[in-house]
Image: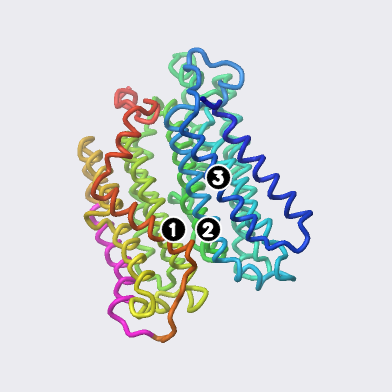
Amino acid sequence: MMIPAPHLEIDVLVLGIGMLLVEIFAGKMNRKVLAFAGIIGLILVLVATFFVQQNPTHEQATGFWSFYTADPLSILFKRFALVTTIIVLVMMIDYAPVVRTFRSSTESGLGEFFTIPVFTCAGLMYLVSAVDFVMIFVSLELVTVSFYVLVSFTRKSPAALEAGVKYLILSAVSTAFLVYGITWIFGVTGETNLDRISAALSSIDVDRTAATFGALLVLVALGFKIAAVPFQIWVPDVYQGAPTPVTAFLSVGSKAAGFVVLVRVLRPFLILPNMERLIVLIAILTLIYGNLAALPQNNLKRLLAYSSIAHAGYLLVGVACFAGSAVVFYLVAYLLMTMLGFAVLIIVAQQTGEGISDFEGLAKRSPLLAFAMLIAMISLAGVPFTAGFLGKFFIFSAAVSQHQVTLVLVGIITVACGFYYYLKVVRAMYWQPATNAGTISASILSRAMIGMLIIAIVWLGIYPQPILRALAGQNPSLVVAKAISTR
């Protein structure tokens, strides 16, 4: 039995509303039950994604289908959003003791802490299916408003409050850029649907200057979401101040959805003058800034924040080189290795701290956690036989095939920088004496999740065919034809 694609988001929203109602009327129930209910519910929706009906073709799309698509690309990233949210909920169970210390009672707020990510997941799922600027805006706001709450959830923490205020103000500014850009584009083309905008821009009667200005405004807004330079100023402070599971969610889920929207939105506008060169310039600046800024960091959470900027640069290299499949594979690899790193960080930080020095001697205190962090760090750095290595290989291979010599050279130099700051963590765990002799334990659920992430990273680094086969039948809108850019 095939399921209509819009039912997936409806099921997730119903799950979130149900969890919220239980939180309100449940009295003194252990709120961790809600987290387990969310995990089970999202797993069922994940299974349902394999039985989804395909949407009408673009020529036949009318009504709701002119706003929403269920092509293979969107289905793949719905699964991405669901898996990310499931992992985040597991992390939140481990992080619950920290949340309790910033609340007025032992269970106060935990239900909302476990419920809001479900609504964020629904927003991400709508966002990757949006093919109309109206739908993109509404979905993006659902995601962003959810993150406003999550970032400052531990509001008695000054760092969390600072992070929440910064994210709120700068995100509101980016939203203003998005709305103003959409207004210019609609004024020029009379359309908000991306396919119809593409058709309108091919007409000689369209004001290309006004359309380019509108596209630049939209690019500024999306640059904020994916943390590309020069729109990355919010990342280090927000990532460091937010609860660690929320930081992981921001780093992976928000970035992935942002890149899917970027690829869809760029497709109609690549016909405009110098748009391709602008993407190349942003990619170079993002690579240089993210990697150089990460070099002196001694706080692991802040290091991962600058690392997130650097990885946005690698993904932009793929976008600039029209390597849609490479971008998708890199995002999948980034999900696995970043979530693994944050999962270990949450467990270790509760007993020692977030500094790299707090990981000294971890190999003796908890061999499993040290090995997991080792796999995460070497994969982020791009060591062979890991998913991160193949992700970078596919990106740079696309850059070489497109003769983007500057991107390749900058990429190779910044990868070398990455080896330095990622291996600082490995050195602390395996070569430095332990500053604390106590052992570090993890729950059975966390150990199982960490084990699965380790296996997935190594497996995809050796045998990437499952992801490549999934991409083989994807919508050609992801891979932008080179002919468009050459005009």
Q: Nearer the viewer, residue 181 or 207?
A: 181
Q: Quadrant of residue 480?
A: top left
Q: Residue at x 45, y 77 (%)?
A: 440
Q: For the residue marked with disc 3, what is the amino acid?
A: Leu
Residue 42 % position (x, y): 55, 45
Q: Would you say the magenta stretch is mainly helix, strand or loop?
A: helix
Q: Nearer the viewer, residue 92 or 120?
A: 92
Which stretch appears magenta? 412-434
Q: Quadrant of residue 369?
A: bottom left
Q: Measured along the vertical axis of the image, is residue 306 above or below residue 182?
A: below
SS class, disc 1: helix
- Sequence-wise, the earlier of marks 1 and 3 is 3
Instruction: Let me know if residue 418 is in the magenta part.
Output: yes
Q: Measured along the vertical axis of the image, is residue 464 above or below residue 206?
A: below
> What color scheme is it?
rainbow
Label disc, if present, on residue 449 of the rendered structure: 1
SS class, disc 2: helix
Instruction: Let me know if residue 459 is in the magenta part.
Output: no
Residue 349 % position (x, y): 49, 73
Residue 184 % position (x, y): 57, 29
SS class, disc 3: helix
Q: Residue at x 53, y 50 (%)?
A: 85
- Sequence-wise, the earlier of marks 2 and 3 is 3
Q: Which residue is mark 3?
A: 42
Q: Are marks 2 and 1 in contact (CB under 8 Å)?
A: yes
Q: How many numbered discs, if any?
A: 3
Q: For the residue marked with disc 2, what is the amino acid?
A: Val
In the rendered view, does 100 fall on the left or right side of 293? Answer: right
Label disc, if present, on residue 90 of the rendered structure: 2
Q: Measured along the vertical axis of the image, is residue 430 above or below residue 177?
A: below
